[in-house]
Image (tube, rainbow, N blue to C red):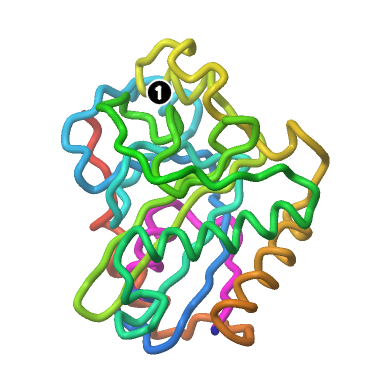
């Protein structure tokens, strides 16, 4: 399993790099990353979402569209992971939910070893909710005290599977609601961040997560994206730009 760590990339580049790696995947790839500035990412099927674009501009926040589905995520004070698998990998063959479960077990186990009471939600059918990903956990997502702590999304092609997600350190419910023109009450008590339970550094979190993924997906090998991969990602950035509503 190749392990890639990229810090503080712009939002469009983060999404483009995930997509390019997915298209060039021939073995498991685990990527950890952060964002250059607070960024709202919309699921690729979120065609019409009411956004406070003035608030985004005034607060120097980015806006992107993910290659995966799901609902809007505010990437801010968090760690993002991406796991990419060849479609023929045994962990990918069980279907969307089975792959979700395998990945969630890796994340939840890592969090428990760090001292967090992380739980994996059972399979459920969610009612139509708000535009916010973190207003409720879906099947096999991770919670602490019933509050969503990790939000993930998956896509599949004929060649590969990409699942990426946000592991929240500090939640920004007020700003999250403001951007989506929601009441903060719609999110109150529904999401949380790891730092609300105990102190943890990004380095500690990455190290423990990498160990658990390695136990399931094979020995890790540090990998730096080649110049060719990065050039392809730069060329694809505009595919993930979001035109303000």
Q: Observer-nearest residue: 10 or 42?
A: 42
Q: Observer-nearest residue: 74 or 56?
A: 74
Q: Position of residue 208 (x, y in %)?
A: 73, 64
Q: Observer-nearest residue: 204 or 95?
A: 95
**Residue under the image location 60 percent in, 72 percent down:** 213
**Residue under the image location 52 percent in, 25 percent down:** 190
Quarter of the figure with the C terminus: top left
Quarter of the figure with the N terminus: bottom right
Give the quadrant of residue 56: top left
Q: Residue furthest left?
A: 47
Q: Observer-nearest residue: 237 or 114?
A: 114
**Residue under the image location 16 percent in, 37 percent down:** 47
Q: Position of residue 211 (x, y in %)?
A: 70, 72
> Which residue is label 1 attached to?
179
Q: Where is residue 170 in the image (x, y as percent from the top left)?
A: 66, 34
Residue 72 appears left or right of 210:
left
Residue 228 appears left or right of 76:
left
Quick check: is 9 in the magenta stretch?
yes
Give the quadrant of residue 155: bottom left
Q: Where is residue 122 in the image (x, y as percent from the top left)?
A: 45, 44
Image position of 68 with respect to 134: above or below: below
Q: Is mark 1 on a helix, strand or loop?
A: helix
Which residue range is magenta in the image? 2-20
Quick check: is 44 in the magenta stretch?
no
Give the quadrant of residue 5: bottom right
Image position of 225 with respect to 19: above or below: below
Image position of 93 with respect to 32: above or below: below
**What count of labels does the image hold?**
1
């Amino acid at each position: 399993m190749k392990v890639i760590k990229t810090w503080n990339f712009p939002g469009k580049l983060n999404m483009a790099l995930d997509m390019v790696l997915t298209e060039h995947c021939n073995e498991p790839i685990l990527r950890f990353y952060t964002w250059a500035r607070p960024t709202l990412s919309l699921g690729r099927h979120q065609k019409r979402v009411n956004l406070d674009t003035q608030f985004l501009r005034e607060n120097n926040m980015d806006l992107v569209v993910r290659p995966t589905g799901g609902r809007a995520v505010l990437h801010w004070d968090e760690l993002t992971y991406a796991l990419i698998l060849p479609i023929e990998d045994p962990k990918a063959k069980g279907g969307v939910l089975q792959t979700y479960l395998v990945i969630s077990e890796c994340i939840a186990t890592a969090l428990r070893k760090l001292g967090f009471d992380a739980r994996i939600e059972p399979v459920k059918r969610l009612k139509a909710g708000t535009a916010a990903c973190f207003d409720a956990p879906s099947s096999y997502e991770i919670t602490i005290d019933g509050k969503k702590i990790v939000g993930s999304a998956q896509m599949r092609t004929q060649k590969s599977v990409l699942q990426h997600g946000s592991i929240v350190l500090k939640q920004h419910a007020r700003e999250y609601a403001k951007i989506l023109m929601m009441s903060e009450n719609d999110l109150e008590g529904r999401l949380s961040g790891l730092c609300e339970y105990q102190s943890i550094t990004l380095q500690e979190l990455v190290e423990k997560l990498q160990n658990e993924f390695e136990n399931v997906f094979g020995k890790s090998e540090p990998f730096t994206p080649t110049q060719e991969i990065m050039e392809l990602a730069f060329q694809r950035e505009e595919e993930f730009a979001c035109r303000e509503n």
